[in-house]
Amino acid sequence: MEGHPMTQIARSIVATTFITMCWFAIAVPAEAQRRVAPDSLRMIQEIEPLHGPRGTEVTVYTENLPLQAKVHVGVGATRTGFEALSEGEQGMWGEVSGTIAIPETAPYDRALLIVAFDAIFAPIGLSDPFHVTRPDGTLQRTGLITEEGVECLAMRDEDEFLYTLVGNLDGLSVGDPVVVEARYVEVSTCQQGTTLEVIESRPPAS
């Protein structure tokens, strides 16, 4: 779908593929580097857990990637770049599994994506977002309050990820730009997006 957030994210990954390729320029010959069309990106089917502090080990499993000689798995954020962290062979049915550690440089204020690359580091799959928390379990998001929530107030962050908000919502209304300090909620009655328990909120810095 043209306006679906994952389509926008896929296009952002394509836009940052050049940056990623530059990181691997020493190891990968220039003639082997290429871009990838958004439609060729598959959704990585399972990552566990979906949140945690830097250093968290994340298990990745998927069965829907194109058959490749080698698959590299990494992390990154939209509009920046992606870093390959591990390498593995696909099983005979195309399944890929592995474990990666969230880097110590991962940001607390943006969601990360787990990304699968082919042998020449072109992206072929991406995951649902992983939310990096501080040691106390909190994170920060900047976004806009929207009308997308049903049971709960909704917010889109700067990367177009959808969140629903519970907790301290005093003064928040649709259309407000906002920075929230919050905790990830694993089980929620909110039916849309990822739920955050807001501890405090403030307007973004001008």
Image (tube, rainbow, N blue to C red):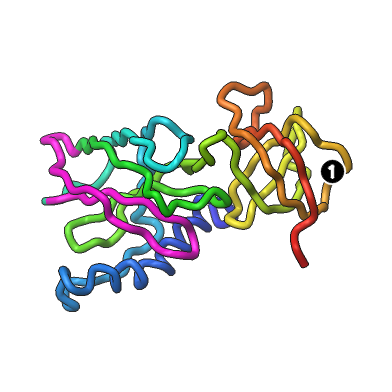
Looking at the image, is 43 positioned above or below residue 12?
A: above
80 magenta-colored: yes
Q: Quadrant of residue 40?
A: bottom left
Please state which amino acid type lies under the numbered disc 1.
Answer: Leu
- How packed mark 1 is, by other alpha carbons closer than 10 Å (few <14, some 14-19, many 20 or more), is some
The C terminus - image quarter: bottom right
Tell me what residue is drawn at x 68 percent, y 36 percent. 164
Q: Which residue lies furthest to the bottom in this view?
A: 30
Residue 185 percent location from the top left of the image: 60, 28
On the image, numbered disc 1 is attached to which residue?
Answer: 172
189 left or right of 4 in image = right
Tell me what residue is drawn at x 88 percent, y 42 percent. 171
Looking at the image, is 49 positioned above or below residue 33?
A: above
Q: Nearer the viewer, residue 131 or 2?
A: 131
Tell me what residue is drawn at x 76 percent, y 40 percent. 200
Residue 188 percent location from the top left of the image: 64, 23
Magenta span covers which residues? 70-94
Residue 122 percent location from the top left of the image: 27, 62
Q: Count the numbered circles shown.
A: 1
Tell me what residue is drawn at x 48 percent, y 59 percent. 78
Residue 150 percent location from the top left of the image: 75, 32
Q: Circle 1 sits in a helix, a strand or a loop, which is it?
A: loop
Q: Residue furthest front?
A: 135
Q: Quadrant of residue 13?
A: bottom left
198 magenta-colored: no
